[in-house]
Amino acid sequence: MVIGLLVVEIHFPHARSLKDKRRELSGIKSRLRGRFNAAVAELDFHEMWQRTALGIVTLNHERLIVEQILDAVRREIEAHVQGEILNAEIRLM
């Protein structure tokens, strides 16, 4: 079994409060959970209102499938996030 983790750091230049950031994150998390059946959590920068680090996890018995899913998740975030992607890294275990 292969476990894949995508860590994405995002900057929200338009956010003026934690409420703004959390509203944006709620939409992102909901979309990813529904479309990719992946676990999504905020990993870092909890109290910073213009920055976050998201962790997205999926697993499968084939490495290629895990890589394809996480790459699709990354593209989905890039296409729909109202902010700037600072870093995106895939880790396989």
Image (tube, rainbow, N blue to C red):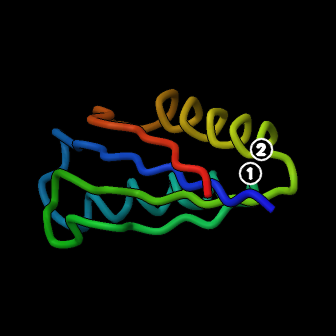
36 and 22: which one is in front?
A: 36
Q: Residue at x 62, y 67 (%)?
A: 39
How busy is the neighbourhood of tag 1: few (under 14 within 10 Å), some, or many (20 plus)? Answer: some
Please, what secondary structure does the residue beneath circle 2 have? helix
28 and 14: which one is in front?
A: 28
- Image quarter where the C terminus lies is bottom right
Q: Residue at x 47, y 68 (%)?
A: 41
The three-letter amino acid code for the residue at tag 1 is Phe
Q: What numbered label is drawn on residue 36?
A: 1
Q: Is residue 81 left or right of residue 68?
A: left
The three-letter amino acid code for the residue at tag 2 is Arg
Please, what secondary structure does the residue beneath circle 1 have? helix
- Image quarter where the N terminus lies is bottom right
Going from the N terminus, do you reach mark 2 or mark 1 first? 1
- The image quadrant that residue 4 belongs to is bottom right
75 and 80: which one is in front?
A: 75
Residue designated by label 2: 63
Q: Residue at x 51, y 52 (%)?
A: 28
The image shows a total of numbered marks equal to 2
Q: Position of residue 32 (x, y in %)?
A: 63, 52
Q: Position of residue 55 (x, y in %)?
A: 46, 59
Q: Residue at x 55, y 57 (%)?
A: 56
Residue farthest right in this picture: 61
